[in-house]
Amino acid sequence: MKQLFTLLLALSCLILPISALAEDDLMYDLGSRAAEVGMDLLKFQAGDDNILVLTNAGHALVKGKTTERALSGISDISGLQNGDNNLFQVNRPNWKPLWFYFFNKETGMATYMEPDSSFLLLNAENRASLPADKAFSQVSLIQVNLDKMLENPDESNTTFNKKKFSGNEFSLIGLSNVWAAGASYEFMNAAMFHDHLCPGVTSGYMIIKYVEDAMPIKNASETYVDIGCPNWCKEDAYQMIWDSTPGKSSMYVMALDPDDEAALQEKYGIRPAGIIVKWNSVSKTGKGLALGFDFDTLSEELGVANWTGPSWAPKLVQDIGMMDYVDKPESAIKTLKEFEVDDDLMTQLKTAGNNPYKVLGML
Ligand SMILES: [Zn+2]
């Protein structure tokens, strides 16, 4: 009896991975088919440096299962991979549909596709009998180079109005253009986590560069703690690049009363942009900077302050234009107050109900 049980157990161990693999194959199949369609439409060979692939595979669930195997399918066929800075997973809620997107920076063309729900019901044999593009319910092929889009605003209006990328237009067009403009891997990572590119996440990247220069981390006991008041998209860059997260008590996010924000802007002549403390967890001491960020001057310099062109464009123009400023963050950032921090002040800065600017005597 015991031998029979052992035999059954051994058999079930053999069978389980096979059935698990069969489920996985659907995702691998989708990823590899997306790569085939992308290569065909954008006319590229495996590993082409001009190509970027973005997907929410690994975040999206399909039929209740995770979708990471699609990434292997994409890489095996297209040669594009995260380690080469040309495959990124864009953060999305797990309930949103799975999609694949390929972009050619040389031509500016991009293709977007979502799996066909009926394809997901087929077994491996039936799937194998279909051509690659039959896996997808919609395949869009569109010009997304920002300069070319601005030259043809009517066509580009249609891209946004008709939601040619199922509502992902702003996110995917911004990410493609900033990648083509040479954005660093860490910047791309921050934008992926934020789920789109915007002036806010770029301001966070600039604040990171500014703070790292003003008060660099010197030993392993130190970390950057963000008192995110007022919070905006910048907080997501800190999480991805500094690993400063709410869960690990290195980020405290709170809204700033509009009257207090206006009062600070009036007093310091710049929009308050939060407080960063370089904190030593062993000595329980730190140094802090209250910062300001000047979006107004940037918008004027980038020509989007009094925008009269298409409504989808100014944020994208600003996004790409701001890349020229990431190496000179002091052009938009100002230190409003510099201060020493002890355990008692740290507690006051992060405790609910306290306005950190009042704690610091700035209001
Ligand atoms: Zn944003």
Image (cartoon, rainbow, N blue to C red):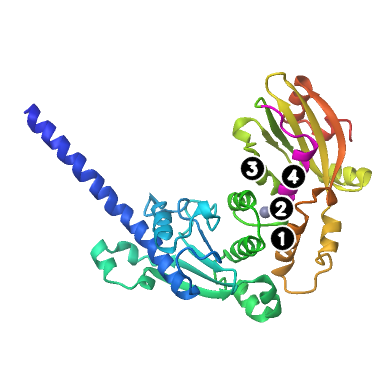
> To which residue does mark 3 refer?
241
**Is 126 situated above or below 86?**
below
Q: Quadrant of the C terminus?
A: top right
- Specify whether residue 132 is in view: yes
Kindly report the distance in space between the C-alpha atoms of the residues bearing marks 4 and 3: 11 Å
**Magenta stretch bounds:** 202-219
Kindly report the distance in space between the C-alpha atoms of the residues bearing marks 3 and 1: 19 Å
Q: For this rendering, which residue is in front, 125 or 62?
A: 125
> To which residue does mark 4 refer?
209
* Overall secondary structure of the magenta section: helix
Kindly report the distance in space between the C-alpha atoms of the residues bearing marks 4 and 2: 11 Å
Give how far across and how far down residue 15 sits, in percent: 19, 45
Q: For this rendering, which residue is in front, 177 or 195?
A: 177
Please name the residue shown 35% across and 61% down the image: 29
Task: Label 4: state its secondary structure.
Answer: helix
Count residues near mark 1 (Cα–Cα under 10 Å), then give few for <14, some for 14-19, many for 20+. Answer: many
Count residues near mark 2 (Cα–Cα under 10 Å), then give few for <14, some for 14-19, many for 20+. Answer: many
Check contact, mark 2 vs mark 1: CB within 8 A.
yes
Callout 2: CB less than 8 Å from ligand 1: no
Check contact, mark 4 vs mark 1: CB within 8 A.
no
The amino acid type, in three-letter code, at marker 2 is Thr
The quadrant in which residue 171 appears is bottom right
Report if residue 216 lies within the magenta region.
Answer: yes
Sequence-wise, which precedes: disc 4 or disc 1? 4
> To which residue does mark 1 refer?
319
**Is 35 situated above or below 67?**
below
Sequence-wise, which precedes: disc 3 or disc 1? 3
